[in-house]
């Protein structure tokens, strides 16, 4: 068995759209992530980041290719994969009529955290995220910052080994984004694999142990920030990103010519 | 599918729903309070209007020969709340005045000479050989009531003439009035109550089951999309079939609960409300829901709830917002009501043809059960039809769930677009199945 907690091989997603025909949202991507690593998918809007993460969280099924998460195949072992991940995106809102505590209890139980330990786990998370003042309040009565805390807390309620965060700091204010980054750092320190997507260069620079640059459904390079700098001779991640995107465009035009 | 996951999700949906004002009002409070409140309001209104109308004085004019007109006017003057306000020579002028609301009725008097009838009375009197006709406007309460008062008054005149004539011919009143037609009501208070219950309960039960399912069905499908919680649901370890089953059971539970709560509240409230408006004296009906009808009614309610829940959820699952869900699910909601509307006649019979119509067939089974009739072959046919209807809905649901873009909300269009494009109904089929 591999040491990698996430292994992706030639993963492809093709949508069949009545108006546009075949759309290759993700085109044969491969990468791996290790425990205790923050792996960033860096790309512009529409690059294929969200589709990739949705496939890894089994919300979408791949058209071809394979991937394993925590040792489970995303197609054959979809339920095991979902139990092994905490998935967060702008489309994974909370149930508004549950309280913060009920939310954590529900997600711990539905993701099969041992029943005998649920209460202790929920108390621990409420304490960790300083949620005591609003733990008994309904989610729809919380401020956006409080909701954000509950959202992140519910992804780790069942203590999954892999966290999948799709653009986790989008729409957050500066302080909330800082909190989010702190949580990601803590999760890495706790030995979790954090796979997250972003188009914010500074965020990727600060957080990621390794970065994959994705453009038009393909990964054009993967490496640490240092290795990317060395390979391109550029210092800033923004310049490195633009370098690879231009290279990808040139390749595409060459193919078309 | 895991029973544990289904239970966890079901409990979460129920808990959430009980905290949603719209669902609690529409699925629980309305069934409990709407029909007793409506019945009370209706009877209050009816009693008020009736009281107002009965208190009015009827304005009547007479048309005919002056002598008989005056004789009739003399007789009618003693009738309470009846006022002779003039006379006319032309009946058409009287009709016009009724239409204008100036008067309420016209009494036309024709003498024997005018109609060419031979004299038959031994004891001739001015009014004895006349014919009377009341003209009125059926569309006006006041006019209708006036015509009834005139008929009663003229009938008194007729009776006096007959008594006088009988005396003149030497016939005792008892002798010529020996032929009586009477009627004896053999229905018990329970029978009368059952008649009212069997007309009201099945119809309202089905309406309430549909209403009870309506909001939860939209909330748990389109509402999930609108709140962005659908993807949250898809990313937990519970299987999609467990989640969908839990949602389905939750919607059906609210539908069945709405229906059954409504029966309880109606049975408990009908008697006291009706007694209040009949001043307690005419306690002719006892509203007792027969124990023998309870199992059939309960099972029928659950089966209809399962059918309606499935139909509403399938349609609403294509919506992206609650409003869109309402418009997509409404046609099915109304379709479940239509056959029930046809059952308002007390004489309609439960036939094999009617047993083939979902929802209406269960309404008929309940209706017969309240009257103590259990036609087992038709009940079996009804059960089979409902099971086929539920199975049909679940088959369509499995087809819908096979398309990933529908599940994740990427499909654009209603169920009818889906049926045409993806299932090939109507001869068109396109790709899009990605799972």
Image (tube, coloured by chain):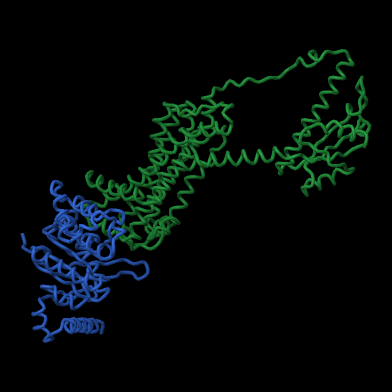
Q: Residue at x 26, y 57 (%)?
A: B234
Instruction: Residue B36: give x, y in percent of width and height.
Output: 49, 39
In the image, A49 versus A132, the foreground residue is A132
Instruction: Residue B267: give x, y in percent of width and height.
Output: 47, 33
In the image, B13 versus A19, the foreground residue is B13
- Please indicate whether residue A67 sits to the left or right of residue B24 in the image: left
Which chain has been coloured blue in this picture?
Answer: A
In the image, B9 versus B79, the foreground residue is B79
Q: Quadrant of residue B358?
A: top left
State whether residue B431 is above or below residue B84: below
Camera sees residue B358: no
- Please indicate whether residue B20 sits to the left or right of residue B368 in the image: left
- Please indicate whether residue B127 sits to the left or right of residue A200 in the image: right
State whether residue A142 is above or below residue B282: below
Instruction: Residue B296: give x, y in percent of width and height.
Output: 41, 31
Colour that chain B carries in the picture: green
Q: Quadrant of residue B227?
A: bottom left
Q: Residue furthest bottom?
A: A233
- Please indicate whether residue B214 sits to the left or right of residue B106 in the image: left
Instruction: Residue B169: give x, y in percent of width and height.
Output: 89, 15
Q: Residue at x 20, y 74 (%)?
A: A218
* Quadrant location of the C terminus of chain B in the rendered image: bottom left
State whether residue A85 is above or below residue B262: below
């Amino acid at each position: 068995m591999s040491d990698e907690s996430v292994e992706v091989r030639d993963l492809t997603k093709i949508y069949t759209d009545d108006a546009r025909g075949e759309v290759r949202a993700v085109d044969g991507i491969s990468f791996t992530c290790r425990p205790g690593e923050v792996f960033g998918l860096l790309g512009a809007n529409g690059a294929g980041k969200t589709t990739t993460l949705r496939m890894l969280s089994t919300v979408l099924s791949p058209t071809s290719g394979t991937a394993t998460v925590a040792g489970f195949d995303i197609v054959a072992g979809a339920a095991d994969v979902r139990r092994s991940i905490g998935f967060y995106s702008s489309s994974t809102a909370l149930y508004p009529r549950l309280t913060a505590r009920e939310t954590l209890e529900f997600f711990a139980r539905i993701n099969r955290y041992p029943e005998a330990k649920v209460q202790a786990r929920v108390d621990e998370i409420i304490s960790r995220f300083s949620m005591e003042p609003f733990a008994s309040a309904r989610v729809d009565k919380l401020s956006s910052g409080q909701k954000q805390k509950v959202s992140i807390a519910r992804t780790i309620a069942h203590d999954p080994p892999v966290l999948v965060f799709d653009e986790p700091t989008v729409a957050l204010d500066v302080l909330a984004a800082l909190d989010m980054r702190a949580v990601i750092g803590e999760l890495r320190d706790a030995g979790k694999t954090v796979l997250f997507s972003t188009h914010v260069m500074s965020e990727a620079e600060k957080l990621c142990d390794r970065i994959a640059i994705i453009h038009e459904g393909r990964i054009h390079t993967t490496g640490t920030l240092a290795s990317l700098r060395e390979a391109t001779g550029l210092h800033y991640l923004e310049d490195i990103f633009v370098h690879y995107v231009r290279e990808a465009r040139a390749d595409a035009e060459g193919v078309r010519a | 599918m895991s029973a544990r996951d289904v239970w966890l999700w079901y409990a979460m949906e129920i808990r959430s729903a009980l905290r949603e004002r719209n669902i609690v009002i529409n699925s629980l409070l309305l069934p409990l309070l709407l029909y007793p409140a409506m019945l009370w309001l209706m009877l209050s209104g009816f009693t008020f209007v009736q009281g107002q109308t009965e208190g009015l004085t009827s304005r009547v004019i007479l048309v005919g020969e002056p002598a008989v007109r005056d004789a009739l006017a003399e007789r009618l003057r003693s009738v309470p709340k009846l006022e002779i306000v003039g006379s006319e020579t032309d009946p058409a002028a009287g009709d016009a005045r009724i239409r204008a609301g100036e008067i309420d009725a016209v009494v036309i008097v024709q003498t024997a000479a005018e109609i060419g009838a031979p004299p038959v009375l031994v004891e001739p009197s001015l009014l004895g050989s006349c014919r009377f006709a009341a003209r009125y406007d059926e569309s006006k309460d006041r006019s209708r009531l006036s015509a009834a008062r005139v008929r009663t008054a003229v009938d008194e005149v007729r009776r006096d003439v007959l008594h006088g004539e009988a005396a003149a011919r030497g016939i005792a009143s008892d002798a010529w009035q020996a032929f009586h037609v009477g009627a004896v009501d053999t229905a018990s208070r329970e029978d009368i109550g059952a008649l009212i219950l069997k007309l009201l309960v099945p119809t309202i039960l089905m309406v309430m089951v549909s209403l009870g399912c309506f909001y939860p069905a939209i909330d748990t499908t389109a509402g999930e999309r609108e709140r962005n919680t659908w993807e949250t649901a898809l990313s937990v370890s519970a299987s999609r079939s467990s989640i969908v089953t839990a949602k389905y059971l939750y919607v059906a539970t609210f539908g069945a609960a709405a229906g059954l709560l409504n029966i309880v509240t109606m049975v408990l409230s009908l008697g006291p409300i009706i007694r209040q408006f009949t001043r307690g004296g005419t306690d002719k009906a006892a509203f007792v829901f027969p124990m023998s009808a309870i199992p059939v009614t309960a099972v029928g309610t659950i089966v209809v709830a399962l059918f309606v829940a499935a139909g509403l959820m399938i349609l609403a699952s294509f919506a992206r917002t609650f409003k869109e869900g309402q418009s997509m699910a409404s046609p099915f909601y109304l379709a479940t009501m239509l056959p029930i509307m046809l059952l308002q006649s007390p004489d309609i019979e439960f036939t094999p043809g009617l047993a083939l119509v979902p929802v209406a067939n269960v309404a008929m089974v309940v209706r017969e059960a309240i009257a103590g009739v259990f036609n087992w072959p038709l009940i079996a046919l009804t059960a089979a039809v409902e099971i086929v209807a539920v199975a049909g809905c679940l088959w369509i649901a499995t087809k819908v769930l096979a398309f990933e873009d529908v599940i994740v909300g990427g499909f654009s269009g209603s169920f009818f677009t889906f049926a045409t494009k993806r299932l090939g109904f109507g001869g068109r089929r396109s790709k899009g199945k990605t799972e």
